[in-house]
Amino acid sequence: MKSTSVPPLNTPLSSVPESQLLDVGVAVFDPNIEQIDEELPIYPEVRRAEARYMADQLSGTLLESGAWGAVRVVPDTNQFTDLLVEGTILQSDGEKIALAVEVTDATGQRWIDKTYEGVTSKYAYERGTRSSQDPFLMVYREIANDMLLVFQSLSARQRREVRTVAELRFARNFAEDAFADYLTTDKNGNFKITRLPAEDDPMLDRVRNIRNRQYIFVDTLQGYYDGFSADMQTPYQEWRKLSYEEIVALRELQNESTAQLIAGGAALIAGIAAQGSSNSAARSAGFIGMMGGGYLLKSGLEKRAEANIHSLALEEIGQSLQAEITPRVIELEDRTVRLTGNVEDQYAQWREIMADIYAAEIGALDPRTPDSSSSSD
């Protein structure tokens, strides 16, 4: 679905009770840097930055709709949250973005599996517009509106069930023996509740404490992503503006040079054929045609060389963007933790730190590694 105009952001038809609010995890998008496109090369350093930025933009749009509980950007898809949003960047060049989006709830039900496309114009990059909204806000709003449609189609019982399954999956991950019998999976891999633990179950209480600690960290991480996006805003929007101009110029040059190469080749062929004519006037015209065809070919090749210069300019812009984005120190409630590498590396280091906290919280029971059919919040 391709969009060029910004739709209104839909909100719930009525107030949603707290017991039915669903928390949303927006995983950092897949940058898809393995994609090969000879016409529009991909710059890995830009794509990785975009993957974080776009996830944060979608998270902010979902939060603005007022339809959800907590909305957080998370570093990967290994999460036990009520709703998980996954995105893959198919195209992003300043003029157009295309995102493959999947939204799945904790029970395993897939809400959305769709490609969203948005096209913008040069007016989106005028200084006043650039400071007020993202050029591709239409895409984020379309995703948010589609998610709200599915949410509103669920009954109150279904919404509460999603929340309960998310909690039980988290609990089973850290206390498998204690919570193994509460959930089953059907033939499609969807989770079903078989029974519920007692509200005063001490193990459930301990697991909830663990989950609350995890929320504190992920909320801190959300601040990281918000700060990352804020720092990235100015250089990224400038990159998009220049990229838009380069893409449009590149396309025009390629179209122009291709037409000239075709015309030049045809003129050369006609001129060569005319040289075999017994008519002197035809031979003279053929010679002129050959000269003109040669000029058109030369002009077309020169324009292709100019197009290559535009491609190199894109690469330089992408490299300069990476230099303007730096890692940060994450402030926790009781300590400052220095985490190095990219966000995903830092999150992996944090999980090691959390392992000690988890072990202390649940006593002798060590945290479990998620199996292939599940993941950790």
Image (spheres, grey):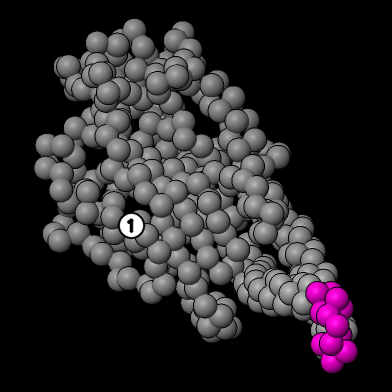
Callout 1: SS: helix
Is residue 222 something that shows in the picture?
no
State the residue at coordinates (36%, 25%): 170
Is residue 186 something that shows in the picture?
yes
- Left or right: residue 170 compared with residue 193: right
Q: Residue 367: x and y, percent?
A: 47, 16
| Magenta stretch: dominant secondary structure | helix
Q: Is residue 132 above or below residue 76?
A: below
Q: Is residue 265 above or below residue 281?
A: above
Query: What amino acid is at disc 1?
Result: Ala
Q: Residue 364: x and y, percent?
A: 46, 8
Nearest the viewer among 138 and 269 is 269
- Residue at the disc numbered 1: 144
Q: Quadrant of the N terminus?
A: bottom left
Which residue is the extreme one toward the front?
Answer: 278
State the residue at coordinates (22%, 49%): 150
Nearest the viewer among 308 and 225 is 308
State the residue at coordinates (44%, 49%): 100
Residue 277 lies in the magenta-colored region: yes
Nearest the viewer among 114 and 323 is 114
- Which span of residues is magenta-colored? 271-283
State the residue at coordinates (42%, 38%): 215
Q: Is residue 254 above or below residue 346?
A: below
- Left or right: residue 138 compared with residue 149: right
Crowd rating for badge 1 (residues with CA inside 10 Å; few <14, some 14–19, many 20+): many
Which residue is the extreme one toward the bottom?
Answer: 281
Nearest the viewer among 33 and 273 is 273
Q: Residue 101: x and y, percent?
A: 41, 47
Residue 312 occupies quadrant: bottom right
Residue 60 occupies quadrant: bottom left
Q: Residue 58: x and y, percent?
A: 43, 56
Q: Quadrant of the C terminus?
A: top left
